[in-house]
Amino acid sequence: MSEITTPNKNVRDDEIDLLDLFRRMGNTLNRWGKALGRAFLISVVFLLKRWLPLGLSIAAGIGISYLLKTASTSFYTSDLVFRNNLALMDKKKMRDNSGTTSEIISKINQLHAFCSEINSSALSQALSIKPESVKNISDISAYWIIDESKDGIPDYVDYKGNHDVHDTTNIRMQDRLDVRVIIHSPQELNLVRDGIIKFIESDSLYQLRNRIRLIQNQELLARLNFDILQLDSLQKVKYFEETRNMKPSSGGQIVFMQEQKTQLVYTDIYLLYAKKQTLESENDLYKGVVTVISDFSFPTRRDNGAMYYGKYLITSCFFLTLLLLIILVNRRKLDEIFKKY
């Protein structure tokens, strides 16, 4: 291979001079740094010299925001959490074998479609609410509740619908769902809640599933009560027989008391009682298709306040004014470019 001879060193023509490369990179970064610093200083000076029109643009954005707040109709947002009583939970996989939670979410989102289409008659009929009250409802939507780390505790609501269904760590809770209502009159939230419950329970298939669930629970309760009585009787017989057999046949004998078998019966009875109490709670607390876990909270502040409009209007007014000032300052250069092309 050929070599290039220089006064200081010999460099092969197929090799890279790292010192020269780093020097060029350093010079490039230095030029970029100076350019950015100069641009920053020019921008600061430009903004300081024109603080009055920019300040007026911010004031105009604030004023328009307050005008829109005064002129527009107030709306409020509140959330409700339902427990799905039809869910058949697989505790190992944390899955609902019935799939009813996804069905109920889809059913409630039919109300969202009615709100989007401004179909007041369909919404009034679905919720069993008077048409004049339905006009105050802006939106009704249902969302999944996400459980992080699969600990059974709800962590957040998937309002954006971007949860990965294949995520095995952060999972959708299969026995509950969130319902968000946007309404103009928060005094009517109770009517909306009752209407949503009626809308869900009006489904004949859900009613049939719920009746079967309650009947099966009653049958299982009857069997549990029978088994508890049988175990209680068995426990008494076993205790009597073991105590009689452990009596000494002649004086002076030492008998070691052993009650392991009787204690096992006690454990079985306690387990049956725990299952019985769970079923009784299920039948007493969760009689319907769904049960309200967390009711609507009464909102104290309207959602569309001045800041609701201001975060868009103030920014828009500021940048539009800034763009106009830049055009006015550079109008000669722009005019030359326009004439040239």
Image (cartoon, grey):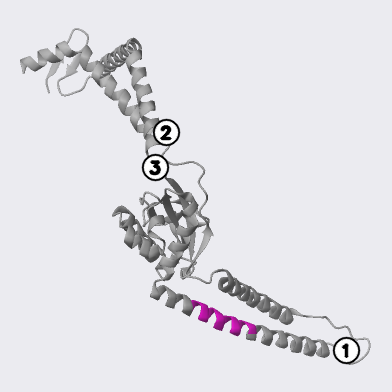
Label located before the other in sequence (3 or 1): 3
Start-end of magenta stretch:
213-225
Q: Residues within 10 Å of mark 2 (few under 14, many from 20)?
A: some
Looking at the image, which residue is at 15% across and 11% down?
Answer: 332
Residue 184 among those drawn in magenta: no
Q: Residue furthest bottom?
A: 249
Q: Residue furthest right?
A: 251
Looking at the image, which residue is at 39% across and 56% down?
Answer: 132
Answer above or below: position of 180 versus 232. Answer: above
Task: State which quarter of the image contains the C terminus.
Answer: top left
The foreground one among 136 and 85 is 136
Q: Is residue 102 left or right of residue 82?
A: left
Which residue is identified by label 2?
307
Disc 3 secondary structure class: loop
Q: Is residue 179 left or right of residue 214?
A: left
- Label ID, residue 73: 3
Looking at the image, which residue is at 21% across and 22% down?
Answer: 16
Is residue 147 something one can see in this rendering?
A: no
Which dot, 3 or 2, sits closer to the camera?
3
Label located before the other in sequence (1 or 2): 1
- Label ID, residue 248: 1
